[in-house]
Amino acid sequence: MLEGSLKRLRTDRIDLYYQHRVDPKTPIEDVAGAIKHLVMEGKVLHLGLSEASARTIRRAHAVLPVTAVQAEYSLTERDVEQNGVVKVCEELGIGFVPWGPVGMGYLTGKIDARTKLDPKVDLRSGFERFSSENITANMPIVDWLRRFAEKKNATPAQVSLAWLSAQKPWVVPIPGTRNPGHLNENLASINVQLTPADLREIETAFSPIKVHGGRMNKEQMRIVDQTN
């Protein structure tokens, strides 16, 4: 598999090689050991894990230092603050890469109950959070974020990205984008400076708010490592 990737990418090494989901049937020590051999061969420089639990991260790191951990993290999805993932990354000096940093589109302010997601091409169509009922129930979140963004002369998406970047210097969000306009909007988030007072205001506003609907469907959640 790696040889095929190297050939297609026309390179002799992969800088950061992710195990994109943890395989419950394969001990993580075996995975880290296999990547360690590839590192020794010079074909891979660094190991990354995606949607791994804190325990799994520790076990892998004991075999081969983990460089990056990727998991969903945003203003509306903060499980990694509670399940020990962010904490273990800080403890072990691992970079954290939030995927879905704008709530898989929720926090752009461009989705409402009338939004139609094509089930043939868009996984979100089967996620509880993206049902029309839950979108309606969650609109107070988006409305508040939109008002706050206006005060900062920014978009809701830019504030969402700036909030993540302000959490820790080793947190680097990875927003998805489908067109150049979204790309430019995301890049401009580096110009949004959130003060300590701004961060407190955001925390005060969001802490009592209930987010309606699970972040993914049961099938997707089954492949999220939640071992204790």
Image: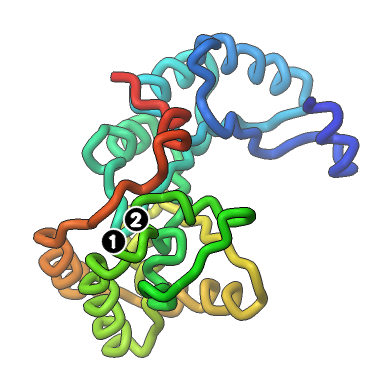
- Percent coordinates x, y for residue 85 in the rendering: 33, 35
Horizontal side of 34 relative to 148 (left or right) equals right
The local secondary structure at tag 1 comes to: helix
Q: Are marks 1 and 2 in contact (CB under 8 Å)?
A: yes
- Percent coordinates x, y for residue 139 in the rendering: 26, 72
- Tell me what residue is drawn at x 85 percent, y 43 percent: 9
Image position of 80 with respect to 39: above or below: below
- The disc, 1 or 2, on the residue closer to the chain's N-terminal end is 2
- Percent coordinates x, y for residue 109 in the rendering: 38, 77
Q: Is residue 158 visible?
A: no
> What label sits on residue 129 in the rendered view?
2
- Tell me what residue is drawn at x 42 percent, y 15 percent: 59
> What label sits on residue 67 in the rendered view?
none
Q: Which residue is mark 1?
A: 134
- Tell me what residue is drawn at x 57 percent, y 61 percent: 118
Between 90 and 97, the one lying in front of the other is: 97
Horizontal side of 126 relative to 140 (left or right) equals right
